[in-house]
Image (cartoon, rainbow, N blue to C red):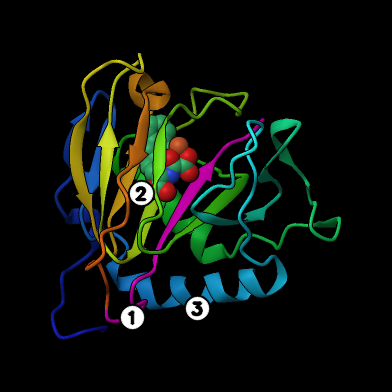
Amino acid sequence: MQGLLDLGAPESAARQPIGPDAWLLKGFALNDADALLAAIERVAAQAPFRHQVTPGGYEMSAAMSSCGAYGWVTDRHGYRYSALDPQGNQPWPAMPRLFSELAERAAERAGFAHFAPEACLINRYTTGARMGLHQDKDEQDFNAPIVSISLGAPITFLFGGPNRSDPTSRWLLEHGDIVVWGGESRLHFHGVAPLGKKASHPQTGALRYNLTFRKVR
Ligand code: MD3
Ligand code: FE
């Protein structure tokens, strides 16, 4: 058992609806958090975190890496999924089994059976880093959900609607939280507010990691 308190199987924990076909699984990854952080270190040793540049010429404030069959790449030419890490032209590190199995279990809990992620994007936020409102549209199959795991310092997640101008709701995402977006929510605008100056976690200090699992093709 990890920690001081047995929280029971995450499968029997509460799931909170945060939008149409979108579920917050509070603490679902807590039992696995130490192993997830260790695995992120191993991925990053092979595919180091980097600040990518958007087609508009802006450097992203979140540093990124990827693992799995595909990684997400942006440069002056555009956004795309690539089987090779452009930093070295090598395949991305394999997706750790812990990652894919946890993502599949979380998807199942949210009502999406047999989720088989092909890519895991890893975002690393430091104080002040943010992600502006956007849609995730670079995948070919919008029927598959996206699963996100938050680790480290807490951040405010902004969840909008199908149009950029739709109002947003705010959700605090903390260490060990998982969110699953499918169906109607899959193409909704979303982002995260700047990581707060005082935001920290005993295991990561001022860093926040977000893993997102996607079916790409
Ligand atoms: C809602 N990441 O990597 S995760 C991203 O916290 C991204 O790093 C944010 O947005 C982060 O693209 C938010 C939550 C998330 C991911 C994908 C979604 C929410 C989503 C796709 C559709 C709707
Ligand atoms: Fe996104």
Label 3 vs 2, first from the N-terminus: 3
Image location (x, y in percent) of residue 167: 21, 21
Q: Quadrant of ligand 1?
A: top left
Give the residue type that dot 1 points to. Answer: Gln
Q: Quadrant of residue 45?
A: bottom right
Residue at horizontal 69%, vertical 61%? 94
The residue wearing badge 2 is: 106
SS for callout 3: helix
Q: Which residue is mark 1?
A: 203
| 140 or 59: nearer the viewer | 59
* Residues rendered magenta in the picture: 202-217
Q: Is residue 161 above or below residue 23?
A: above
Residue type beneath disc 2: Ala
> Callout 3 environment at 10 Å: few (<14), some (14 to 19), or many (20+)?
few
Q: Where residue 206 sits in the image (x, y, percent)?
A: 34, 72
Mark 1 CB near ligand 1 (8 Å cut):
no
Asked if marks 3 and 1 touch (Cβ < 8 Å), the reply is no
Q: Secondary structure at mark 1?
A: loop
The residue at 63%/69% (across/down) is 43
Q: Is residue 208 magenta?
A: yes
Q: Tell whether 177 sits left or right of 186.
A: left
Label 3 sits on residue: 38
